[in-house]
């Protein structure tokens, strides 16, 4: 008799997994200052709103395919359903590569920032040792049932959202609404000024991971509803939170100064704001939460990579042994072990080569993974047109959403490829 557990994921659990993959605190501390400095400055909040609208169009079209596939297989199943098996096979291989690369990139960031934070508090630990400990914990949680991982990232995600929301409230209370939320951030000349395309590119990077809800259909209690709901909730939550927090940051620094100040402080910008508005203790807490944010994102993308590997292995596009499901935990344990070994080899390789873990490993791996995932999102939006061409019942507004989503995502991919050196420093 099988002892495998029944599907355990609710919509709330899936939302936690996919929002954690987007790593809200990591995006605010690491990506937003770059968008301020090299993008459209005070207009960055509007770039998040516009990117969120494009991804809502994508979500509306993706829902058509997700309901037809039963919420399983992610972009691979979407491409097969709408564009045929050859396109699906290519999308599946791209997905395996992209999510594995993104996972390795985030693992490097976790090791790098954890080492820096520990050094600030008197503990000298190499980045690769921090990455090794993080990878061991990620591998262990990925091996167990997905519910354990979802509960873990839920706690971490709640903490990082809470500290950022506390900062937002402190700025609004101290400075007042007009100063904390300057109208300049949504003025057309600021939004569409120099660097708008760069800001859109960084905004797209910050959303990576929200689309992975469809990978958990096999473990969801009600996949046809949970997957679609989780995708909508994730994109709205992430877009609203990113836009609001970056808007408050513009107000705290000053719309006229934010580009220069972000260029000077870069990754320290939000820690400086936390120290100023919440005190040094809160800034220290935010430092440690940056590490937990990166850990949660690594775990979420590790889980996504595993499920793509398992799906392709089940269709004999990868070694069939990787399709196995753990008899008790109901997890893709062999795919997870393979991903853990791959990440370990990557960490060892970069460490032995003496490469910088952030500029040599994180930015390049995460940049390549991001381009792959954005391309997959565009293909998934396009696949709805294939479904509509072959069958009835796809509403005109969903077809329109598919076209708009594809156009926006194709533009984001082009911006990412054209600005790859800026995005990765490579």
Image (cartoon, rainbow, N blue to C red):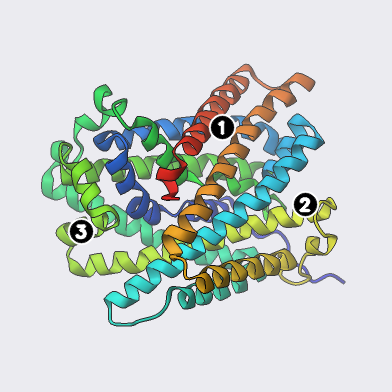
Residue at left 69%, top 29%?
Answer: 383
Residue 367 makes an appearance in the image: yes
Question: Against 423, is 164 above or below?
Answer: below
Q: Nearer the viewer, mark 1 or mark 2?
A: 2
Mark 1 → mark 2, Cα distance in angstroms: 24 Å
For residue 144, say whether it is visible. Answer: no
From the image, state whether disc 1 or disc 3 is nearer to you.
3
Residue occupying the point 48% across, 74% down: 128
Q: Left of 397 or right of it: where is 76?
A: right
Residue 205 screen position, x and y as percent: 46, 44
Give percent across and percent down for residue 397: 58, 19
**Residue at (17%, 46%) from the top-left corner?**
253
Q: Mark 2 — residue?
A: 312
Query: Callout 3: 10 Å neighbours few (<14), some, many (20+)?
Result: some
Q: Quadrant of the N terminus?
A: bottom right
Quarter holding residue 313: bottom right
**Which residue matches tag 1?**
58
Residue pointed to by mark 3: 272
Residue lying at the far left of the rendered structure: 175
Q: Tally the numbered discs.
A: 3
Q: Residues within 10 Å of mark 1 (few under 14, many from 20)?
A: many
Q: Work out whether mark 1 precedes mark 2 in sequence or the reverse, and give the earlier one.
A: 1
Instruction: Indicate the secondary structure of the residue bearing disc 3.
Output: helix
Res. 258 image quadrant: top left
Label whose residue precedes the other's in the sequence (1 or 3): 1
Instruction: Give the structural element (helix, strand or loop) at label 2.
Output: helix
321, above or below 395, in the image? below
- 308 to 283, vertically: above or below: above
CA neighbours of label 2 inside 10 A, class few (<14), some (14 to 19), many (20+)? many
Q: Position of residue 153 (x, y in %)?
A: 50, 63
Looking at the image, do the residues carrying marks 3 and 2 touch, with CB atoms under 8 Å apart? Answer: no
Question: Which circle's residue, 3 or 2, is located before the other in the chain?
Answer: 3
């Amino acid at each position: 008799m099988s002892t495998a557990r029944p599907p355990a994921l609710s919509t709330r659990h899936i939302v936690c997994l996919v929002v954690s993959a987007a790593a809200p605190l990591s995006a605010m501390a690491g990506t937003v200052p770059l968008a301020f400095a090299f993008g459209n400055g005070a207009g960055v909040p509007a770039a998040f709103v516009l990117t969120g609208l494009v991804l809502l169009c994508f979500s509306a079209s993706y829902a058509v395919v997700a309901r037809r596939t039963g919420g399983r297989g992610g972009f691979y199943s979407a491409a097969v359903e709408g564009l045929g098996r050859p396109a699906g096979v290519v999308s599946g291989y791209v997905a395996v590569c992209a999510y594995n690369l993104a996972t390795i990139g985030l693992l490097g960031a976790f090791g790098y920032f954890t080492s820096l934070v520990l050094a600030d508090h008197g503990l000298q630990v190499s980045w690769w040792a921090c990455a090794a400990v993080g990878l061991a914990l990620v591998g262990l949680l990925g091996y167990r049932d997905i519910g354990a991982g979802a509960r873990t990232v839920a706690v971490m995600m709640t903490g990082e959202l809470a500290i950022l929301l506390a900062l937002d409230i402190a700025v609004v209370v101290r400075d007042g609404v007009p100063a904390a939320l300057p109208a300049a951030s949504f003025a057309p000349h600021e939004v569409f000024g120099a660097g708008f395309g760069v800001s859109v590119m960084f905004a797209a990077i910050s959303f990576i991971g929200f689309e992975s809800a469809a990978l958990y259909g096999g473990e969801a209690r009600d996949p046809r509803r949970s997957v679609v709901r989780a995708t909508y909730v994730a994109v709205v939550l992430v877009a609203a939170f990113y836009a609001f927090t970056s808007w408050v940051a513009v107000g705290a620094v000053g719309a006229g100064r934010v580009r220069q100040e972000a260029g000077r402080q870069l990754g320290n910008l939000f820690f400086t704001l936390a120290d100023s508005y919440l005190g040094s203790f809160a800034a220290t807490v935010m430092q440690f939460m940056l590490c937990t944010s990166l850990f949660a994102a690594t775990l979420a993308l590790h889980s996504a990579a595993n499920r793509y590997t398992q799906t392709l292995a089940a269709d004999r596009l990868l070694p069939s042994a990787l399709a196995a499901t753990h008899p008790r935990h109901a997890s893709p344990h062999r795919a997870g072990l393979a991903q853990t070994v791959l990440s370990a080899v990557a960490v060892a390789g970069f460490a032995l080569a003496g490469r910088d873990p952030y500029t040599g490993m994180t930015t390049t791996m995460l940049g390549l993974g991001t381009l792959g995932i954005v391309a997959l999102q565009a293909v998934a939006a396009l696949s709805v047109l294939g479904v509509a061409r072959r069958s009835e019942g796809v509403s005109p507004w969903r077809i329109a959403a598919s076209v708009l989503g594809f156009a926006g995502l194709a533009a984001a991919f082009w911006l990412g490829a054209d600005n790859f050196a800026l995005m990765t420093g490579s």
